[in-house]
Amino acid sequence: MRVGRHWAVLVSLLPVLAGCRDTPQARAAQVRAVQRIRAQQLARRMAMADSGAGQAAPLAMWLMPPELNEISGLALTARGTVLTHDDNVGRVYEIDPKTGILLKSFSLLGNPKGDFEAITIAGADIYLMTRDGKLFKFREGADGTQVPYTTYDTGLGKQCEFEGLTFEPDSSRLLMVCKRFLEKQAPHALLIFRLPLPLGNGASISEMRIPIQEVAGSNHWKNFHASDINIDPSTGNYVVIASREKGLVVITPDGDVVRSEPIPGDHRQPEGVAVTRDGILLISDEANVKPAVITLYRWRP
């Protein structure tokens, strides 16, 4: 477990821990104390939100360490932690979303450089996606290790600039959401590509295109530049955010827009989104005047 300077911080709720000697055992005890206090505070805030008090207020806001100043996508593991990454190098970080503690990090073999914009988990495999639609496939590694990987070029980078990727378990396919059409004459719409797994098996890529009028609803959005996509585990619906519009939409797998609203709270550059099984919305923000953070909200489908 990472300790010391690698802690993420709960804004305004950081407990004061003093008098600990700077030894591995003391630092580990310090981490456990922080985890316990933060978990208790988060549980109290969730109970308040469930009672109707402060439903739109953040449950917590975790400051990220400097190496995650350009934090991008989020992917929830089966054990309830979240994987995330910076967008300049193939390095993956594991964070406990309930406490903000950075648990470990590992790299792709050789630390490949790239414009990495999104991450998702599909069974035992993890995928990192670059802006031009290339996918890096690998398995999870231990703290401080490097893992081998394979790459797959979807060929979709000629049509779109991408920032959002997720795995849809019910259909065993990857979803890639277009942030920006490269053809200037393309109509404004939300475009999601569906890639059947395993990649390269000859199955065709399908797409779902939703007109901007349906996406925007009553919001005054002229476009929707999607920055991430994830799956609501309680409904199977797609949750999509857009950093430029500061917007959030929920879409059924059939393409029906069931929610269209501003992202809650005050976000300068929201880049990643995830919904936990116990109903917490996670939003990650790159550093932009303010430090990089992961913010937690109560989520109701």
Image (cartoon, rainbow, N blue to C red):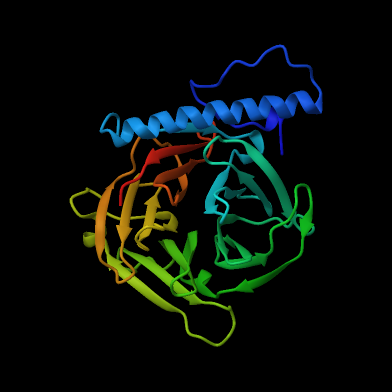
Residue at 47 percent across and 27 percent down: it is: 41
**Residue most extreme to the top:** 19
**Front position in the image: 290 or 294:** 294
Up the image or down, 208 lies above or below 24; here it is: below
**Front position in the image: 99 or 32:** 32
Quadrant the N terminus occupies? top right
Can residue 224 be seen here? The reply is: yes
> Percent position (x, y) of residue 235?
34, 60
> Percent position (x, y) of residue 250?
31, 57
Instruction: Using residue 267 as the reference point, say whether residue 163 is left or right of it.
Output: right
Residue at 58 percent across and 78 percent down: it is: 199
**Residue most extreme to the left:** 218
Can residue 289 be seen here? The reply is: no
Residue at 70 percent across and 28 percent down: it is: 5
> Percent position (x, y) of residue 194?
44, 73
Rendering quarter of residue 22:
top right
Q: How many marks?
A: 0
> Percent position (x, y) of residue 123?
58, 67
Residue at 76 percent across and 23 percent down: it is: 26
Up the image or down, 120 lies above or below 151; here it is: above
**Front position in the image: 181 or 145:** 145
Rendering quarter of residue 191:
bottom left
Up the image or down, 159 lies above or below 99; here it is: below
